[in-house]
Amino acid sequence: MTTVAILVAAGSGTRLGSDMPKALIPLVGRPLLAWSILALDASEHIDGIVVVAPPGHERPTEMALGEIAEPLAVTIGGSSRSRSVAAGLEEVPDGADRVVVHDAARPLLTSDHISMVLAGIGDADGAIIAAPVADTIKRTDEDLNIVETADRSAHWLAQTPQAFRTESLVRAVEIALEGDYIDSTTDCASMVEAMGGQMRVVPSALPNQKITIPADLDVVAPLLEAREARA
Ligand code: CTP
Ligand code: MG
């Protein structure tokens, strides 16, 4: 079984408000994306890594990978996350049975996440790491009147990594491009769901915070510092 990782790192980081692409901002001594590369490289299941870089920042992205890992390819991202995934898929070599897609914005990735999500595929088209919901979920109308309290146990917070049979994700991306809804999808699983594929959740309590706004840096930095101290 051959498994290739696609690290999507091509976003601009509008909500973070930094003057450089989010994946390249320094965090605890490394560019943000380097933390994910370290974990992907440490996983016994990953045979190669494709990095999807911010347009115009291919060289700094290659520099940020430094001596950690030699990627299969560094390619340029698209105008939305899913288009960046599509660009990454173009670089996945024939013969890769499975792909693991991960957001560079989640630096707390570990080889445990990767093992868990791959084991979760089973007979399905793919699986995702997801966290149970701790808060009560309210659905509202457009005026913020509550119209429903949802069944919390049936809802999950979708994270990355997300793992797929390569043929399933390739087909799902093709259909999303043909159907012109690719830009409205915010994760890969939803494209497979939209074509009627079977996706499974792998419940995870592992820390996996996404860096979206500046306050997220304050949450994640101490965890990475602790990891460095243990290494
Ligand atoms: N991403 C990408 N290509 C895009 C948009 C996003 O590869 N055109 C990647 C980001 O680099 C990130 C992941 O998808 O690793 C999740 O996206 P998000 O957290 O939304 O990052 P940004 O789009 O960069 O941030 P923002 O939405 O605040 O601009
Ligand atoms: Mg975004």
Image (spheres, helix red, strand yellow):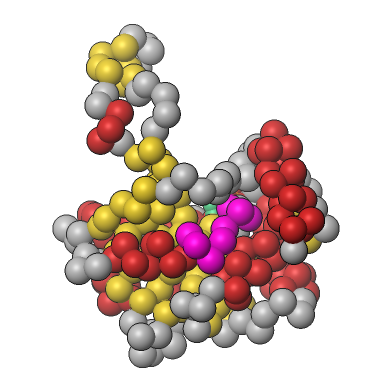
Please tell me whether residue 130 is drawn above or below residue 191 in the rendered image: above
Viewer-proximal residue, 129 or 17?
129
| Magenta span includes 110 | yes
Residue 59's quadrant in the figure? bottom right
* Span highlighted in magenta in the image: 106-113
Please identify the quadrant where the N terminus is shown: bottom left
Picture coordinates of residue 104, whole percent (x, y): 60, 59
Please identify the quadrant where the C terminus is shown: bottom right
Picture coordinates of residue 226, whole percent (x, y): 74, 50
Q: Residue furthest front?
A: 230
Q: Which residue is found at the position 73% from the left and 37% from the top?
A: 218
Q: Residue furthest right?
A: 29
Picture coordinates of residue 227, whole percent (x, y): 71, 55
Q: Which residue is found at the position 35% from the left and 53% from the top?
A: 202
Q: Which residue is found at the position 33% from the left and 9% from the top?
A: 145
Q: Residue furthest left?
A: 196
Picture coordinates of residue 177, whole percent (x, y): 32, 63
Please tell me whether residue 20 is drawn above or below residue 36 in the rendered image: above
**Secondary structure predominantly adopted by residues drawn in magenta:** loop
